[in-house]
Amino acid sequence: MSTATTVTTATRVTTATRPAPDLTARHSPVTRPVVTGLGVVAPSGIGVEEHWAATLRGDLAITPISRFDASGYAARIAGQVPDFDPNRYLDNRFIVQTDRWTWFGMAASRLALDDAGYDPSSRDAYDTSVVFGAGSGGNDFGQRELSRLHTRGRGAVSVYQSIAWFYAATTGQTSIRHGLKGPSGVVVADGTGGVDSLAAARRTIRRGTASVLAGAAESGLTPYALTCHLSSGRVSTAARAQAAYKPFDVRANGYLPGEGGATLLVEHPAAAAERGAAKIYGEIAGYAATHDAYHHSQAAPSPLWLAVAMRRALADAGVEAGEVDVVFADGAGSRDLDALEAAALRDVFGAGAVPVTAPQGLIGRLCAGGSALSTATALLALRDGVLPAVGNLDEPDPAYGLDLVREPRPCAARVAMVVARGFGGFNSVLVLRRPA
């Protein structure tokens, strides 16, 4: 879809109530930032614990598309966020200016800040940055305004159309809402964007910023967005949720789109200690990204570059393959893509050598929001010592040679790997470590 890029956004000036912590002496290119807050808005629930409980129960959150009449489309079911009321999280001025995807991102950010006990208003404006991933932008707002343009003329188009659809809208509006002036941006890389935003957060912290809101959320359930999904030829057209998105299953037949995602508050470990952070979910220990450079839409026939990304992430973390306790796989849900990912995992870890899960089979693929949510879920697995099962998996394909988690599995995991792939050849891998 889109080439990875970073767009800087501007925020308003706020009055500092105290100076930013001096991290100069502690600045290091090998600093491992820590995650101190999580916010989730997803088909599995709103809030960290609601999402986590639903994931461990294996609740299948795939429902008939309700936001528009999808009866004329080949796919009519998807992962939808239930009972989301933007008024609970946003002032009306933000609601009228922004799209549903930004509502999700801003709500998840509010939840992450609350979870971390982090009050941006009590800190210097330059103390905190915002870096989000994005894959599709403001679909709902954009489609509505373009329809008005064609049917009623330019005078009917909202003045906010120029910003609401834009990939950087959630970053910009979040920074404006909280008065954040640290280096901010957006990473556009389809499904890897959520993981890539966390890598950008790590870079930002290593350059001296104390804290970063990072992650991604998406809302691609509109007529135009669904048409784009279907054009890939990889969307399941099964009528029943149980028969649709099934990562690593012998009956895998494509993915289902979904909406939502997660925001994570990432902090310099010294800054988190200085403010007395109540909890640390884990550290961002390693990251790597590659690109297949093969075709703009067709999958590369070899898993080489995905495996390279895994190895480089492990090397960046200083971790051997045998030290990884669980892999949160991309789990594309197509036979060919699942086979390629399985081949990469076997190449790096060995056949059946590491537990592999993909809970997103329960909720659909959330584009950039999916890899952010997988990271949050991996951190919860490290926190509670339990591995969630692969979502909607009935009959694992033995040809993959993977130790697929079939039901919640107790595991005193210390190291987790999160794998993300994006349409067009993006490969990104994150290594997380449980705090000592």
Image (cartoon, rainbow, N blue to C red):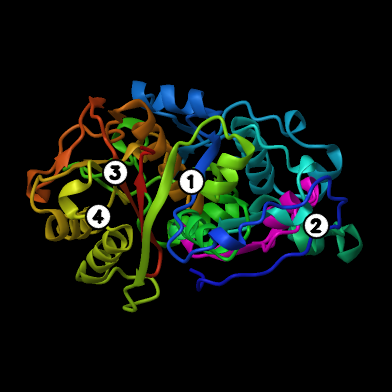
Give how far across and how far down residue 205 sits, in percent.
56, 59
Q: Which mark is first along the chain, 1 or 2?
A: 1
> Do tag 4 and tag 3 residues touch (Cβ < 8 Å)?
yes
Q: Nearer the viewer, mark 3 or mark 2?
A: 3
Q: Which residue is mark 1?
A: 34
Q: From mark 2 to mark 4, how far is it between C-alphas?
A: 54 Å
Q: Which mark is first along the chain, 1 or 3?
A: 1
- The stretch in magenta equals 166-191
Q: Is label 3 in a helix, a strand or a loop?
A: strand
At x 23%, y 53%, the residue is: 338
Q: Which mark is residue 415?
A: 3
Q: Which mark is first along the chain, 4 or 2?
A: 2
Q: From mark 3 to mark 1, how far is it between C-alphas?
A: 14 Å
Rendered position, 135 above or below 412: below
Q: Nearer the viewer, residue 326 or 319?
A: 319
Question: What amino acid is found at the position of numbered circle 2 in the picture?
Answer: Arg
Question: What amino acid is found at the position of numbered circle 4 in the picture?
Answer: Val
Q: From mark 4 to mark 3, how far is it between C-alphas?
A: 9 Å
Residue 131 in magenta stretch: no
Rendered position, 433 above or below 186: above
Q: Which residue is mark 4?
A: 319
Question: What amino acid is found at the position of numbered circle 1 in the picture?
Answer: Val
Q: Residue 374 occupies which quadrant of the picture? A: top left
Q: Is label 1 in a helix, a strand or a loop?
A: strand
Give how far across and how far down residue 201 sits, in percent.
54, 58
At x 35%, y 56%, the residue is: 234
Q: Which mark is residue 393?
A: none
* Farthest-out residue, front: 25
